[in-house]
Image: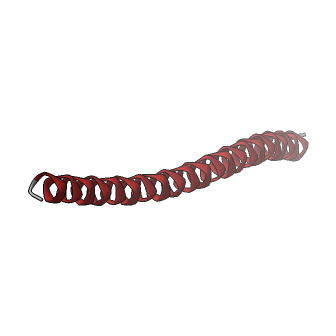
């Protein structure tokens, strides 16, 4: 009888460990999914950041072009006044 009881305890412990293992696998899969979601979000933000940097550089370029054009017009205007 003692042998049988010990065997039942071993089986019960084995079943408990299998249950815990399955729970850990589920948790691992959930964490992997969350990690993938965060990586995707990070990539989206990097893409958006690069787009904004590009737009910022374009606007700076446009601003410099307008400043140059303004200075050219001021020069032309001053030239006309002094003629």
User: In front: 10, or 83?
Assistant: 83
Count of numbered labels shown in the rendering: 0
**Residue at the image point whose x is 13% and y is 51% from the top:** 81
In the image, 52: left or right of 29? left
Point 27% across, 52% down: residue:
70
**Which quadrant would the N terminus be assigned to in this image?**
top right
Q: Residue shown at 48%/50% (left/top)? A: 52
From the top left corner, tell me how far across and down residue 43 is, in percent.
60, 55
Left or right: where 65 falls relative to 77 = right
Image quadrant holding the C terminus, namely bottom left
Q: Quadrant of residue 51?
A: bottom right
Residue 5 lies left or right of residue 79; in this view the side is right
Q: Residue furthest left?
A: 82
Q: In the displayed structure, would residue 59 be above or below residue 26?
A: below
Q: Residue 5 or 73: which is nearer the viewer?
A: 73
Q: Position of residue 2 (x, y in %)?
A: 84, 41
Q: Kindly give the residue lying farthest to the front in the view shown.
A: 83
Above or below residue 37? Residue 75 is below
Q: Along the line of sight, which residue is nearer the eye, 8 or 80?
A: 80
Q: Residue 30, how many percent across, how many down?
A: 72, 42
Colour mode of the rendering? secondary structure
**Residue 8: image x %, image y %?**
87, 40
Give the image quarter of residue 57.
bottom left
């Amino acid at each position: 009888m003692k042998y049988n009881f010990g065997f039942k305890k071993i089986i019960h412990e084995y079943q408990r460990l299998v249950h815990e293992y399955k729970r850990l696998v589920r948790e691992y899969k959930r964490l992997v999914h969350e990690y993938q979601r965060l990586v995707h979000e990070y990539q989206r933000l990097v893409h958006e950041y690069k787009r904004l940097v590009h737009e910022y550089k374009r606007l700076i370029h446009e601003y410099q072009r307008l400043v140059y054009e303004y200075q050219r017009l001021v020069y032309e205007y001053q030239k006309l006044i002094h003629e």
